[in-house]
Amino acid sequence: AAKRKLNGPQLYDPIMDSSSAQTLSLLTELRRAIERNELRLYLQPKVPLQGKPGLAVEALVRWQHPQRGLVPPMDFIPFAEQTGFVRQLTLWMFEESARLLADPRTQGMGLRISVNLSTRDLLDPELCERLQAMLVRHGVLPQGFCLEITESAIMDDPQRAEAMLNRLSQHGFKLSIDDFGTGYSSLGYLKRLPVDELKIDKSFVMGMEHDHDDEMIVRSTIDLAHNLGLTVVAEGVENAAILERLRALSCDEAQGYHVSRPVPVDAFLSWHAQRAWA
Ligand code: C2E
Ligand code: CA
Ligand code: CA
Ligand code: CA
């Protein structure tokens, strides 16, 4: 499990409470969160650096909890993964994203939406059919979506992941490897997977200004991606200097606080309207 902050109140500790009554109550609360409409779709733009048209956004979940306020994903995603609830969460996020792609306010933007998949989703035999059904329901095409899968989720069970990625790709979904560089995948494996995009983990991007090794990793990843015919995205772009450096290194897209923080749909639409004016 990921390291957790020691300061400040924690929502729950999924490790310590894994068999307690608190686990059950969190699971109940999460299920209710969907029924009571407490989950929120936040969007963070991924802007093109090389003048290509169109705009991509990553869909990131938040939980608007009646007592605790806006809960960040790291406080409940690990728990949702452990309990399998994350599969429902993925479907909720995908459906909201499909709704957005069908929304008249996003027409003409050339919008593509990235949705995160978890390890659990890769094991769900019905995932493809479920996503497909939502596309039909909202009248949108799979090409409008990119599914982000972390390198470590793939390496959890590479053969199974490969089979699932092949199916998703055959259905027309674009695929991205998230947190690239942190999951020890073999390059030979990468070559076989039907992926379209690599996302360089933010730890390298945030470090590249001051750490020569981080800069080398970013440069090598951009070259590797391009040599394999893949698009490459840098996440965690926090200032203009890094953005310009990435542009000079031929990185395709940038995502980070410097461009925009993750924001609710309406705020994203205003951001986009202002950007179009500029
Ligand atoms: P991720 O998929 O790697 O998402 C990127 C995270 O980096 C987001 O955190 C985003 O807010 C943050 N970020 C973006 N730009 C910057 C920056 O310039 N600097 C810094 N320091 N951080 C930046 P967030 O939204 O808190 O999400 C954290 C993680 O929770 C995500 O990491 C993803 O693993 C998971 N997650 C979020 N939403 C979902 C979801 O709908 N489904 C699943 N399965 N996981 C999700
Ligand atoms: Ca992601
Ligand atoms: Ca990431
Ligand atoms: Ca991450």
Image (tube, grey):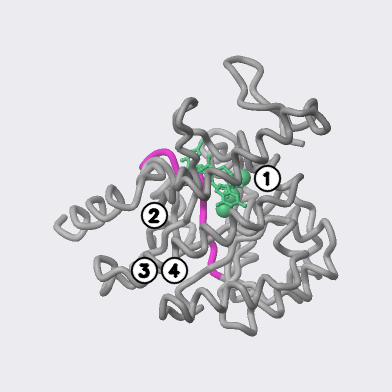
Q: Which residue is mark 1?
A: 80
**Magenta-drawn segment:** 231-241
Q: Position of residue 69 (x, y in %)?
A: 45, 29
**Label whose residue precedes the other's in the sequence (2 or 3):** 2
Spatial CA span between label 3 and label 4: 11 Å
Total marks in image: 4
Decide which of tag 1 and tag 2 comes sooner along the chain: 2
Q: Classify mark 3: residues with Cα within 10 Å, few (<14), some (14-19) or many (20+).
A: some
Q: From where the camera sits, is residue 215 visible?
A: no
Q: Is mark 2 within 8 Å of ligand 1?
A: no
Q: Label 2 is placed on what type of residue?
A: Pro
Tell me if 204 is positioned left or right of 123 in this view. left
Q: Position of residue 140 (x, y in %)?
A: 42, 78
Q: What residue is rendered at 83% in x and 65% in y?
A: 158
N-term-proximal mark, 4 vs 2: 2
Task: Give the numbered dot on residue 45.
Answer: 2
Q: Residue furthest toward the bottom?
A: 170
Q: Cβ of disc 3 within 8 Å of ligand 2? A: no
Can you tell which mark lies on residue 98? 4
Disc number placed over residue 163 in the picture, else none: none
In the image, what residue occupies the spot 35% across and 47% down?
264
Which one is in front, 99 or 183?
Answer: 99
Question: In the rendered structure, which amino acid carries the disc numbered 1?
Answer: Ala
Rounded to the nearest angstrom, the CA distance separating label 3 from label 1 is 28 Å
Q: In what quadrant does ligand 4 lie?
A: top right
Mark 4 lies on a secondary structure that is: helix
Quarter of the image for the C terminus: give it: bottom left
Residue type pointed to by label 4: Ala
Q: Nearer the viewer, residue 235 or 57?
A: 57
